[in-house]
Amino acid sequence: MIYRTGEKFIGIDLSGMHCAILLIDKRVVSSVIFRVVGKDLAEVPLAATSAQAEGQGYFQALFCCLKRLLGSLAVKNVVVSALKEAEPMWIKKFGFKKLTPGEV
């Protein structure tokens, strides 16, 4: 994600976006983009692991660190945007639940 200071994007608010990465031997193996939206909510619009590192638990380690960081900031909820195919991973591995339209 690239943001140039002073550049304006119509309809897109990139303020407060952060990126956390996990490096192994100076190579990025997993990353997550997140934004803290007050004490009640953090959103994770993008999470990725390199194809060579998939299935090795690297993202779980990175997400554990992110949860600790958000916990230290007293953030209560984390929301992710997930493809239908990825929903089972977020629910089974990370304990997320699917929101109803009313909760959204």
Image (cartoon, rainbow, N blue to C red):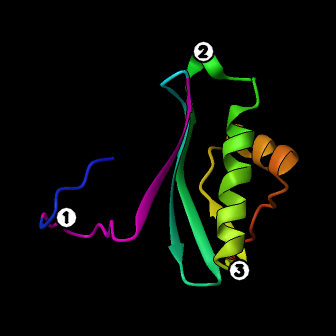
Q: Amino acid at mark 1?
A: Phe
Residue at mark 3: 102
Asked if the residues shown at circle 1 and circle 2 are in contact, with their CB atoms under 8 angstroms apart, the answer is no
Instruction: Report the residue at 69% width, 49% height from top.
Output: 63
Give the labeled residue for mark 1.
Answer: 9
CA neighbours of label 1 inside 10 A, class few (<14), some (14 to 19), many (20+): few
Name the residue nearer the viewer: 76 or 64. Answer: 64
Horizontal relation, residue 93 to residue 17: left or right: right
- Residue identified by numbered label 2: 52
Residue 8 pos. (x, y %): 15, 67
Q: Residue furthest top?
A: 52
Residue 95: x and y in percent read 85, 55
The kind of secondary structure element at disc 2 is: helix
* Snapshot quadrant of residue 59: top right
Mark nearest the camera among 1 and 2 is 2
**Residue 43 image-quadrant placement:** bottom right
The mark nearer the N terminus, 1 or 2, is 1
Residue at x 60% of width, y 15% of height: 52
Give the answer, above or below, for where 3 lies relative to 74: above
Magenta segment: 7-24
Q: Residue at x 84, y 44 (%)?
A: 93
84, 34: nearer the viewer? 34
Residue 44 sits above or below residue 54 on the image: below
Amino acid at the residue labelled 2: Gln
Residue 75 - label: none
Around disc 2, counting alpha carbons within 10 Å, would you say few (fewer than 14), some (14 to 19), or many (20 or more)?
few
- Distance between the Cα atoms at labels 1 and 2? 34 Å
Instruction: Name which of mark 3 and mark 2 comes first in the sequence.
Output: 2
Q: Secondary structure at mark 3?
A: loop
Q: In the depicted view, which residue is nearer to us: 101 or 46?
A: 46
